[in-house]
Image: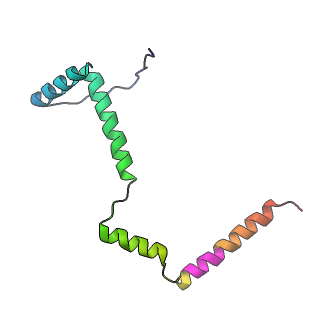
Amino acid sequence: MTQVSRTARIEARIAPQALEIVRRAAELQGRSVSDFVVAAAEALAHKTIEEAHIIRLSVEDQHRFAELLLDPPALSPAMHRAKAAHARLIRNTTNAAIPD
C-alpha cells in the first residue's frame, strides 16, 4: 500500500449538525473524517471544473447550432480580410521555415 504524502493543510468551520452528517458518512465509508472531507472536496472540485468545460444549450439552440454548422452564413468583409491575412501569415511562416 502506497502512503500519500500530505504537505498542505486546510481548516474550516462547520456547524455541529453538518459535522455529525460528515462523521456518519465517513464512518459508513470506513474513513477518517479528514480523509472523507478531502476526498469529497476533491471529487466536487473535479466535477466543478469538468462542468465548466461543458456548453449547455436548449433544444432550440442545439437546432440553431446544427443549422449554422450545416449551412453557415456568408463571410463578412472583415472575415474575408482576416482569412486573407491568415493565409499570408501561414504562407510567410511556411516559406521562412523551408531552407533554400
What count of labels does the image hold? 0
**Along the horizontal axis of the image, is 23 left or right of 72?**
left
Q: Is residue 76 above or below residue 20?
A: below
Task: Tell me the quadrant of the picture where the C terminus can be found.
Answer: bottom right
- Residue at the image point whose x is 18% and y is 23% from the top: 23
Residue at the location (16% across, 30% down)? Answer: 14
Q: Main secondary structure of the magenta part?
A: helix
From which residue to which does the magenta span run? 79-85
Image position, residue 68 (x, y; %): 44, 75
Quadrant of the rendered structure where residue 92 is? bottom right
Above or below, 5 relative to 84: above
Quadrant of residue 45 within the rendered picture:
top left
Residue 50 rendering spot, x and y as whole percentages: 38, 47
Instruction: Kindly identify the residue that appears in the image at 55 percent across and 81 percent down.
Output: 78
Q: Position of residue 40 (x, y in %)?
A: 29, 32
Q: From this view, report whether residue 52 is shown above or below residue 19.
A: below
In the image, is 96 to the left or to the right of 81?
right
> Is 41 placed left or right of 18 in the picture?
right
Vertical comparison of 18 with 84: above or below:
above
Considering depth in this image, is 13 or 78 the residue closer to the camera? 78
Q: Is 82 included in the stretch rendered in magenta?
A: yes
Color style of the picture: rainbow
Query: Where is residue 1 drawn, in percent x and y?
Result: 44, 14
The stretch drawn in magenta includes residue 28? no
Q: Residue at x 25, y 18 (%)?
A: 30
